[in-house]
């Protein structure tokens, strides 16, 4: 695409970038151009492909197809080092400073000024102090990184990028953890970077901020670029429309009985410091409640507390008419509340054990006498539950680690079906699962509700929430921001409730 | 499935290979007397390795078992030769009491280890390193640094103490007459084999054993599945401690004395046997049978080199090489396995999802 003479020179041109992960097309022929001295915002829902694109720019991932050109010259990166050498820096949301090292040492990490192989610590400290002061930092450059606030750590990262002569800096959700004032300061610094001719990529969920700081906006959805244009040309509503789109849709599976049963679990004012505040919700028999929100809104943390995996700081719960405050998952399971974690591999399954051993892990007492496991009864029970979730092949002696993602999730499900729970808390039950298995899992989840269970489902995939939930509770930054009935819930309304309020001045 | 590739075929094969080669080239190796000697020499390490694998399968480590052998040994020896115990229980009874004291002391130390690891969350390496030092110090403290056991000729209880030592020796150094074995079968070896069978049963057939693998394979997933991780850890350290206590009792019986410096560096031999036998230090993987084969491999190698008149220094070097080979072989097998997976296209492993 030829540049119009008015636009500044493109710093980085990514053309036709495609990246495939097993079962997922993360990026589908995406074009992305960053111009010198301008801010280009990258917007999209969780899983839209923003992080993957940043990783490719940073040289941390290699595209399966497409080209990158820096200042007009085609490049290809074998490692992040190559991208750094060309002045491309990505500052990730999880900042990557060494906690025990001082800010100055962090700035020069990997490129320490040295004289005859010895560190020149004085020179490093002086240059670091200059760089930090230039960014408006007021803290002692020797302060260990772990003692700095998030905003201060960001400045250290910026100083590090500048010390490396960065020509492009990408910021992944830089304002997520910042106060209003800190955000304003960061914006000032971003404008200064632009004045120096640096191209800036700004990834954020805060649409108002995006429109304020960005010159151009690109919206990604399901790995495709669905919108690209000058920031001045769009409003929030238009951006949200682009973000949610209508690409993936699941057939809605309605409940057998339109009227939900009595409340099974009532939670009031649940609070866990630094995670969520004053969350109240009710789970009823036969009803699926969708817990929607962005990653980091506190949904997982709420579910983990209800399941006894983490402790609450405040709030109360009533389960089947009796007070409920589990001190451990064991206690929660004893009260028939089970949690199916987001990350199957690290939390849901013991990958080294086989399917049978995983399925019976919480219920092994039932199949043992005097501590000795009754193999025949255990096998029969495992085989029955595995058949119920349609594991294919239904081999209960296969090691869990060798199964596909969808099959692993079915094993987790079989485990909790066997536990005969009343309350099921699903955290991203279909992440990384192929479409066919997804619908199977959806059917199983619905049949649980129809069998009188209370179901909570956390999903970052809006269509999934809309297809399954009879009621949608939306969380935003640790609190409940709204509740919608199935009839009221549309992708736009849910997303509008989920997106964080801007720090508008 | 719960053994590393090495242990499934590598170690038994290596063991068989060494036995055949040694049998052909070393005169006297294949004699029944020598084979039983090997079993006897292996038995203490085998018992310690068996106890250690419980801990290692939970992704822990117990560095204190050698010191526990020392401490439990002197306590057992003190009980065995105590005037009060001899008076109340008689020499044979004293042997029983001594055995209980030794095993109990070991289990108690293990419970302390496990309690600190489970409740306070301190790294097992640190906890048991501290215990290794402390238990050794305690053993020297209670004995004043000298071995306990053989009485002075002028001791008024001389005869009874000798009788008690003899009673325990019947276990620690005893032989069970077996037709065709002129020297009989050593009791400690029998104890080891029985314990391996018991340990294998506990690991594969009981709920506790299942939890041991689960906790070692994925502690968080186990906790979320309602497994009482703390109790499991307490249990495995207690087992390691009790095994060390039992080994100490056998050693006291064998030597007719309990020395505060007994069992020095035994923990490393036990860990070596476990690793050679296919136990993964990362947890979740290992078997009782593997612990036995690992200990046997070390024992056979030592014995063969002994018979050849090779210096013990060389034996140490050989053992080091074997440990390395066992683990390297495993790494290679895993890489081969991984490649096979990738080629089959079962790549869902990465599970990477954007943004």
Image (cartoon, rainbow, N blue to C red):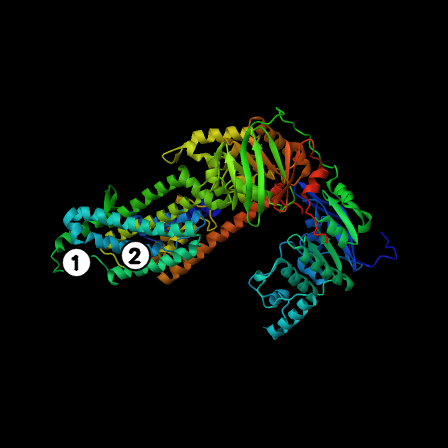
Q: Position of residue B97 (x, y in %)?
A: 22, 48
Q: Position of residue B117 (x, y in %)?
A: 41, 51
Mark 2 chain? B
Q: Position of residue B83 (x, y in %)?
A: 16, 53
Q: Relative to the observer, which residue lies in front, A492 or B39?
A: A492
Q: Residues within 10 Å of mark 2 (few under 14, many from 20)?
A: many
Q: In the rendered image, which residue does mark 1 sit on?
A: B151
* Distance CA(mark 1)–CA(mark 2): 19 Å
Q: Is residue B288 left or right of residue A78?
A: left
Mark 1 chain? B
Q: Residues within 10 Å of mark 1 (few under 14, many from 20)?
A: some
Looking at the rendering, which quadrant does residue A146 occupy?
Answer: bottom right
Residue A342: in sight, yes or no? no
Q: Is residue A77 above or below residue B51?
A: below
Q: In the rendered image, which residue does mark 2 sit on?
A: B70
Question: If you read the primary sequence from the N terminus, does the residue marked by circle 1 or circle 2 appear first?
Answer: 2
The residue located at (49%, 32%) in the rendering is A321
Helix, strand or loop status at disc 2: helix
Outermost residue, bottom side? A116
């Amino acid at each position: 695409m030829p540049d119009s003479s008015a636009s500044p020179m493109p710093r980085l041109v990514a053309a036709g970038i495609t990246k495939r992960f097993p079962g997922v097309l993360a990026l589908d022929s995406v074009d992305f151009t960053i111009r010198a001295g301008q801010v280009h915002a990258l917007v999209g829902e969780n899983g839209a492909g923003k992080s993957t694109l940043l990783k490719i720019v940073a040289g941390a991932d290699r595209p399966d197809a497409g080209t990158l050109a820096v200042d007009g010259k085609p490049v290809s990166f074998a490692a992040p080092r190559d991208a750094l050498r060309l002045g491309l820096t990505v500052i990730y949301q999880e900042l990557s400073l060494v906690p025990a090292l001082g800010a100055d040492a962090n700035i020069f990490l990997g490129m320490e000024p040295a004289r005859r192989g010895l560190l020149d610590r004085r020179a490093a400290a002086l240059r670091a102090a200059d760089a930090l002061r230039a960014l408006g930092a007021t803290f002692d450059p020797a302060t260990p990184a772990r003692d700095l606030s998030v905003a201060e750590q960001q400045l250290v990262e910026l100083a590090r990028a500048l010390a490396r002569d960065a020509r492009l800096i990408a910021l992944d959700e830089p304002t997520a953890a910042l106060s209003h004032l800190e955000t304003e300061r960061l914006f000032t610094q971003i404008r200064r970077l632009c004045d120096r001719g640096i191209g800036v990529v700004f990834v954020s969920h805060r649409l108002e901020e995006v429109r304020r700081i960005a010159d151009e906006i690109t919206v990604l959805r399901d790995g495709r670029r669905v919108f690209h244009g000058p920031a001045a040309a769009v409003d929030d509503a238009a951006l949200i429309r682009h973000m949610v789109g209508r690409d993936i849709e699941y057939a809605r599976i309605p409940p057998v009985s339109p009227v939900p049963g009595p409340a099974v679990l009532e939670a009031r004012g649940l609070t866990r410091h630094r995670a969520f505040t004053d969350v109240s919700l009710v789970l009823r028999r036969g009803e699926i409640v969708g817990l929607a929100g962005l990653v980091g809104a506190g949904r997982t943390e709420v579910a983990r507390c209800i399941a006894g995996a983490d402790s609450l700081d405040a709030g109360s719960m009533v389960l089947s008419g009796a007070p409920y405050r589990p001190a451990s998952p064991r206690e929660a399971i004893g009260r028939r509340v089970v949690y199916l974690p987001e990350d199957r591999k690290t939390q849901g399954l013991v990958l080294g054990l086989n399917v049978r051993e995983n399925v019976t892990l919480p219920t092994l007492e039932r199949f043992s006498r005097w501590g000795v496991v009754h193999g025949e009864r255990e096998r029969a029970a495992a085989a029955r539950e595995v058949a119920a979730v349609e594991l294919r092949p239904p081999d209960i002696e296969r090691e869990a680690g060798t199964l596909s993602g969808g099959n692993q999730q079915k094993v987790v499900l079989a485990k909790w079906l066997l536990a005969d729970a009343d309350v099921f808390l699903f955290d991203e039950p279909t992440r990384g699962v192929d479409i066919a298995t997804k619908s199977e899992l959806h059917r199983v989840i619905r049949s649980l509700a129809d069998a009188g269970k209370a179901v909570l489902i956390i999903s970052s995939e809006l269509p999934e929430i809309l297809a399954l939930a009879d009621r949608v509770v939306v969380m935003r930054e640790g609190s409940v921001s709204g509740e919608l009935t199935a009839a009221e819930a549309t992708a736009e309304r849910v997303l509008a409730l989920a997106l964080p309020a801007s720090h508008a001045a | 499935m719960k053994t590393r590739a090495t242990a499934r075929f590598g170690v038994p094969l290596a063991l068989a290979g060494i036995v055949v080669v040694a049998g052909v080239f070393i005169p006297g190796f294949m004699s029944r007397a020598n084979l039983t000697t090997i079993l006897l020499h292996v038995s203490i390490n085998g018992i310690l390795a068996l106890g250690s694998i419980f801990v290692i399968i939970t992704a822990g480590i117990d560095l204190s078992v050698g010191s526990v052998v020392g401490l439990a040994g002197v306590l057992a020896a003190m009980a065995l030769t105590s005037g009060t115990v001899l008076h109340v229980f008689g020499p044979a009874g004293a042997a029983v009491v001594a055995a209980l004291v030794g095993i109990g002391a070991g289990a108690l130390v293990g419970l302390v280890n496990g309690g600190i690891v489970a409740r306070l969350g301190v790294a097992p390496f640190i906890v048991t390193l501290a215990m290794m030092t402390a238990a050794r110090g305690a053993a020297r403290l209670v004995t004043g640094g000298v071995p306990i056991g053989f009485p002075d000729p002028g001791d008024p209880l001389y005869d009874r103490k000798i009788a008690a030592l003899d009673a325990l020796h019947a276990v620690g150094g005893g032989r069970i007459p077996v037709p065709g074995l002129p020297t009989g079968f050593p009791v400690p070896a029998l104890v080891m084999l029985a314990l391996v069978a018991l340990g294998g049963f506990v690991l594969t057939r009981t709920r506790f054993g299942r939890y041991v693998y689960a906790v070692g394979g994925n502690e968080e997933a186990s906790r979320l599945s309602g497994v009482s991780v703390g109790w499991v850890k307490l249990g495995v350290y207690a087992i390691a401690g009790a095994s060390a206590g039992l080994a100490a009792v056998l050693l006291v019986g064998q030597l007719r004395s309990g020395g505060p410096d007994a069992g020095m560096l035994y923990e490393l031999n036990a860990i070596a046997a476990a690793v050679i036998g296919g136990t993964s230090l990362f947890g979740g993987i290992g078997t009782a049978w593997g612990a036995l084969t690992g200990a046997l491999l070390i024992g056979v190698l030592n014995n063969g080199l002994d018979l050849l008149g090779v210096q013990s220094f060389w034996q140490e070097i050989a053992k080091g090489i074997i440990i390395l080979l066992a683990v390297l072989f495993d790494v290679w097998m895993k890489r081969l396995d991984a490649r096979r997976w990738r080629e089959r296209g079962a790549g869902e492993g990465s599970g990477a999802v954007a943004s």
